[in-house]
Amino acid sequence: MNYIKPTIIEALCEFRFASSEDWDSTIYGELWNLIKDKYPKKEERKQMSLGFQIGPNGQQGSSEISESAHMLFKSSDDKSLVQLQSNLLTVNVLCPYSGWDSFKPKINSAFDKFSSLGDFRLQRIGLRYINRLPKVDENRDYSKWLSQSPYVSEVVLKCKEGQGVNSRVSVPVDGNRISVTVSTELPNGGDLFVDIDSSCDSFSTSETSDVGELLESLHYNLIEAYESLITGDLRDEMGVKDV
């Protein structure tokens, strides 16, 4: 279904690649040259990682600090982003979410342009929708918005505003995987979020040549999961679009 006021506050698609000899620091600039007409703003962040070497008897050996680049390329209104890190390409769209027909072309375009820069073997695709649900009425529990499903337990449904929850379920679906996290903003409550990740980490050669078809499958599974865990009250709150 399409909703007038969807609960999605961020949608993103992550492409993870195996290490490749074609990867080097010039990739960041080359990608930006291909996409800067739609993502003219760029921001660089540095990521630090700390590694330890453990000896045969469990003793800690030398440690190594490594630094890697994390580039963000943003649209003029900051509502669409392409992010590039070592072996990871991410496409984000922020609230207000304008729909799959708008989001999917952004994903395909970024993936195709990145793929043109070298031989990169795809290891995982993850399509995620992060939802913030409306506040529940006083003295009402989360069953107002969430229904019992394979992804949401009865225990979560009985919690009320001011009672923190953090529940995660991950199951295989049609050869892929759906992971659903239901959590409050703070340990003791706050806004309620539903984070749905539809992912694939096993690819045939034919599948990697048609990422668009894979994305459609992941999106279908994600929407099916979302529709299975929300209530009629939440649908009424969002309002169904006439199509």
Image: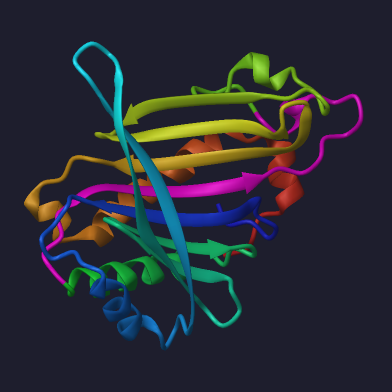
> Which x, y percent locates residue 74?
50, 75
Q: Nearer the viewer, residue 132 or 186?
A: 186
> Which x, y percent locates residue 216?
33, 54
> Residue at 54% across / 32% down in the picture?
181
Q: Nearer the viewer, residue 27 or 205?
A: 27
- The boundaries of the magenta stretch are 118-146
- Give the left or right position of residue 176, taking residue 5 as reference: left
Q: Is residue 132 magenta?
A: yes
- Give the left or right position of residue 185, taking residue 49 as reference: right
Position of residue 211 relative to residue 152, above or below, is below
> Residue at 49% across / 22% down in the picture?
150
> Which x, y percent locates residue 107?
36, 66
Position of residue 155 relative to residue 144, above or below, is above
State the quadrant of the C terminus. Answer: bottom right
**Numbered disc total:** 0
- Give the left or right position of residue 139, taking residue 141 as reference: right
> Which x, y percent locates residue 92?
48, 62
Q: Is residue 159 magenta?
A: no
